[in-house]
Image (cartoon, coloured by chain):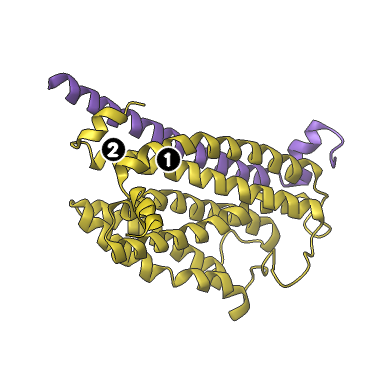
Amino acid sequence: MNHSLVNWFKFASPASFYPLVGRLIPFFATAAAILTIAGLWVGLVVAPTDAQQGEGYRIIFVHVPASWMSMFIYCVMAFWAALGLAFNTRLSGMMTSALAPTGALFAFLSLWTGALWGKPMWGAWWVWDARLTSQLILFFLYLGFIALQAAIDDPRRADKAGAILALVGVINVPIIYFSVQWWNTLHQGASVSMTKAPSMAHTMLLGMLLMALAFWAYTIAVALMRVRCIILERELTSGWVKKNAME
Amino acid sequence: MQWNSFNDFLAMGGYALYVWGSIGACVLGMGIEIWMLKLRRRAILARLLRKELTQ
């Protein structure tokens, strides 16, 4: 058998994944803390005032990273879901469930900060605009995923049902992303584009990217913490848990 | 540095409610998530310990 294949599947077993992840969490947690401090410093103190929106635009430093993460986490969930359905690995389902609450949190924060940005700039907390509505659907998809899994007692069946919901729902992510191009919306276009030079001041861009990296590191740390809880809860009766869990 | 004083910084050019409401919600949400995870882990470990003791 091919050697690299053996090594990869070794970490697909919860018993060897658990201690590995335990060593990674402090690294990502520290990175998240440092990046958040740096990002907030650049975003709130160093970045210049916006010509049109005054200081109100500073919501961007949490709004855009939270929105990006909410979409990205759903894609990662769909990836694990597909892997779980294809290879029937237990860990894939655990990873999908571990990501969902964090994704829901970011979807909520995206809507919340968006409302607080919409009120002073558009004059409304909420409008039924394509971008806002599709993001609200993303939030409901996260809640639906969590509720569906909670409603099924057998964890393996819950994983399968959740995986299908994650895969079907992922179609919503490109709809959110391109909604500002496909429809006439109140929401402004993409803040950062691969094809165009950035239109905002360098320090604004830097602050936003630092905050995005901070949210990334936070998500990884929290999802790994949660997957460790899920592993313990599901494998409580197996022998390795008794030996290793307390570390 | 964009600010003349700390009060200036807090006022956010009149957008204090919106800017601090956004950042505060993020801090609160993430804080609650981490706190809930700590509680969840503590509950599992307590359960494990109880099982260990009864066996």
Which residue lies under the disc numbered 1?
A21
Q: Which colour is chain B painted?
A: purple
Helix, strand or loop under label 2:
helix
Q: Quadrant of residue A243?
A: top left
For residue B53, above or below residue A181:
above
Taking depth in this image into account, of A48 and A82 the one nearest to the observer is A82
Q: Quadrant of residue B24?
A: top right
Other-residue count near label 2 (Cα within 10 Å), few / some / many at <14 / 14–19 / ≥20? many
Q: Residue at x 41, y 51 (%)?
A: A99
Image quadrant holding the N terminus of chain A, namely bottom left
Taking depth in this image into account, of A225 and B25 the one nearest to the observer is A225
> Which mark is first along the chain, 1 or 2?
1
Which residue lies under the disc numbered 2?
A232
Q: Residue at x 69, y 64 (%)?
A: A192
Q: Residue at x 46, y 42 (%)?
A: A222
Q: Amino acid at mark 2?
A: Leu
Q: Which chain is yellow?
A: A
Query: In the image as oriented, which residue stretches furthest toward the left?
Result: B55
Horizontal side, residue A84 vs residue A60: left or right: left
For residue A239, above or below residue A128:
above
The chain containing the residue under callout 2 comes to A
Total numbered labels placed on residues in the image: 2
For residue A136, above or below residue A17:
below
Taking depth in this image into account, of A14 and A93 the one nearest to the observer is A14
- x and y, in percent, of residue A201 in the image: 82, 57
Q: Which numbered disc, 2 or 1, marks the residue closer to the eye?
A: 1
Question: Mark 2 to mark 1: distance in Å?
Answer: 13 Å
Taking depth in this image into account, of A165 and A77 the one nearest to the observer is A77
> Do the residues at pointers 2 and 1 share their chain?
yes
- x and y, in percent, of residue A235 in the image: 23, 40
Which label sits on residue A149?
A: none
